[in-house]
Image (cartoon, helix red, strand yellow):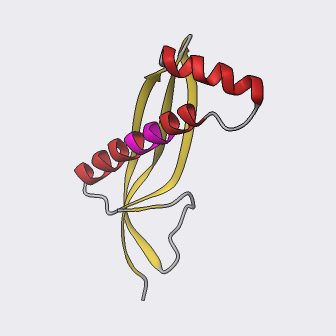
Amino acid sequence: MIIVTTDQIEGMRITKNLGLVRGSTIRARHVGKDIMAAFRNLVGGEISEYTKLLAESREQSIKRMTDEAEGLGANAIVATRFVTSMVMSGAAELLVYGTGVVVEEAN
């Protein structure tokens, strides 16, 4: 599966537009990680617990979007975007969406 943020893929031609595809996940913070993050906030530096949590959320969302696109018969996704939003205190949604398409090599 080719996934790009652009509307076109260099060297490829879109032969079919299959429409919107998306994947999302909602993750809650962990109390233990919040305590570690609070300490790290005092001394500065990257909050690796949250970095890992967000990386896992992105990968899960991309997998769900890719599964949806494959189910429609797509071999690529163009115009991919990420959005995050708070769902409730301590929980956030990570949404990824794009356009599922069928591409072939341009002549």
Q: Residue 73: name its quadrant.
A: bottom left
Where does the image place residue 39, in percent across and percent down from the top left?
A: 67, 21
How many numbered marks are there?
Answer: 0
Q: Is residue 72 left or right of residue 61?
A: left
Judging depth in this view, the residue of 17 and 75 nearest the camera is: 75
Q: Quadrant of the N terminus?
A: bottom left
Q: Is residue 48 left or right of residue 2?
A: right
- The main secondary structure of the magenta stretch is helix
Where is 39 relative to 23, above or below? Answer: above
Q: Is residue 30 left or right of residue 60?
A: right
Q: Quadrant of the C terminus?
A: bottom left
Looking at the image, which residue sits at the far right?
Answer: 43
Where is 97 relative to 101, above or below? Answer: above
Q: Which residues are magenta?
A: 55-60
Residue at image coords 53%, 76%: 10
Where does the image place residue 5, in percent across and percent down from the top left?
A: 55, 57
Residue at image coords 44%, 75%: 13
Can residue 35 be seen here? The reply is yes
Where does the image place residue 57, in percent across and percent down from the top left?
A: 45, 36
Judging depth in this view, the residue of 35 and 103 nearest the camera is: 35
Residue at image coords 50%, 60%: 4
Where is 41 relative to 45, above or below? Answer: above
Can residue 21 be seen here? The reply is no
Where does the image place residue 22, in percent across and percent down from the top left?
A: 40, 40
Where is 23 relative to 7, above or below? Answer: above
Looking at the image, which residue sits at the far top?
Answer: 89
Residue at image coords 32%, 63%: 75
Residue 91 highlighted magenta (yes or no): no
